Amino acid sequence: MAKKSKQGSSKTGFAGDVRAMTIAMLEDGDVTRFEMTVDKALGLARLRVVGTDGRVTTRELLGAGLDLPALPASGDAAADRTARNAAILACRAKGLTQAETARLLNVSQPLVSKVLRAAKN
């Protein structure tokens, strides 16, 4: 099966990236079935692929609307935590679920929940 894609990069934007992903799945001999859901408002495409060996994988493609700055690794734990928390709040503002936010930022869902709860108070 094709490699996992996290960020769109083609010159045609999100729509072109979704088209390219669809064509790649249609042409991939190792794929027996795939399902794609696209949220145009969020700019998020989620692809569920079933391979000839029965393996199921999920891939995500992020459009420009979800591009977030890379989280810094400055060595200053407080600054890194502040940047991470700001990114979590930005994802919530864009309508992502806690699970989607956790996957996108490579953090745990309980951490996302904790940050969102703290922000409410």
Image: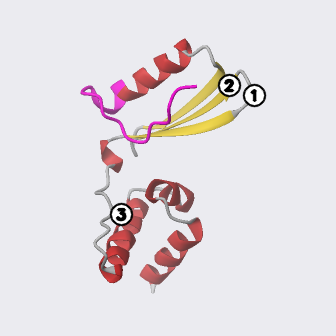
- Image marks 2 and 1: residues in contact by CB distance under 8 Å: yes
Q: How many marks?
A: 3
Q: Nearer the viewer, mark 2 or mark 3?
A: 2
Question: Which residue is at a point 35% across and 80% down the rendered structure image?
Answer: 77
Question: Which residue is at a point 51% across and 79% down the rendered structure image?
Answer: 117
Q: Secondary structure at mark 1?
A: loop
Q: Which residues lie in the magenta part?
A: 1-16
Judge whether residue 69 is colored magenta: no
Q: Residue tagged by mark 3?
A: 90
Q: Residue tagged by mark 2?
A: 51
Q: Amino acid at mark 1?
A: Gly
Q: Quadrant of the C terminus?
A: bottom left
Q: Secondary structure at mark 2?
A: strand
Instruction: Identify the mark nearer the N-term, 2 or 3.
Output: 2
Q: Residue tagged by mark 1?
A: 54
Q: Amino acid at mark 2?
A: Gly
